[in-house]
Image (spheres, helix red, strand yellow):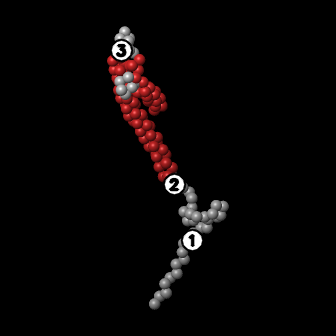
Amino acid sequence: MYLLLLIIAIIVCVCLGLIVLIQNPKGGGLSSNFSSSSQLMGVQKTGDFLEKGTWVLAIGLMVLSLAINVAVKGGANKVDTKDQLEKTKELSKPTNSGAATPFAAPGTAQPQQQAPATTPAPAK
């Protein structure tokens, strides 16, 4: 879904760029090429079409941006929750490592701890 929305957004961006480049900020642009009044889309209608197309593509790009944001956040939360659940399960498993000597070198036998010898206190 994310990839489809991203491809559509890129196409909309390219179309929006082309429509903006066709327009002339001083009212000329593509509409200046249609000087004949017998054209199907005259000077005024071409300007209206390009202006409406610009607005439609701009609004469409905003909507697509929001949809992509929702699609990414929805997918990321599911993955994060699953990963966090697996990590929590791994951390909660008991380990059989010796707690007496945490810094023992590999390959050496771990000495067994003996209870400290208690000496009776001298009586007075």
Q: Residues within 10 Å of mark 1 (few under 14, many from 20)?
A: few
The residue at which mark 2 appears reads as 94
In the displayed structure, does residue 72 sit left or right of residue 105?
A: left
Residue 59: where, in percent of width, then height? Answer: 36, 29
Image quarter hosting the N terminus: top left
Q: Nearer the viewer, residue 50 or 12?
A: 50
Label 1 vs label 3, nearer the camera: 3
Given the current orientation, which residue lies at the most extreme right position?
Answer: 107
Mark number for residue 82? none
The answer to whether one can see residue 4 in this image is no
Up/down of 101 relative to 53, above or below? below
* Label 3: element kind: loop
Mark closest to the chain's N terminus, 3 or 2: 3
Q: Residue at x 46, y 46 (%)?
A: 84
Q: Residue at x 37, y 9 (%)?
A: 38
Report the number of numbered marks. 3
Q: Check contact, mark 3 vs mark 2: CB within 8 A.
A: no
Mark number for residue 114? 1
Residue 102: where, in percent of width, then height? Answer: 56, 63
Mark number for residue 42? 3
Amino acid type of the residue that numbered disc 1 sits on in the rendered structure: Gln
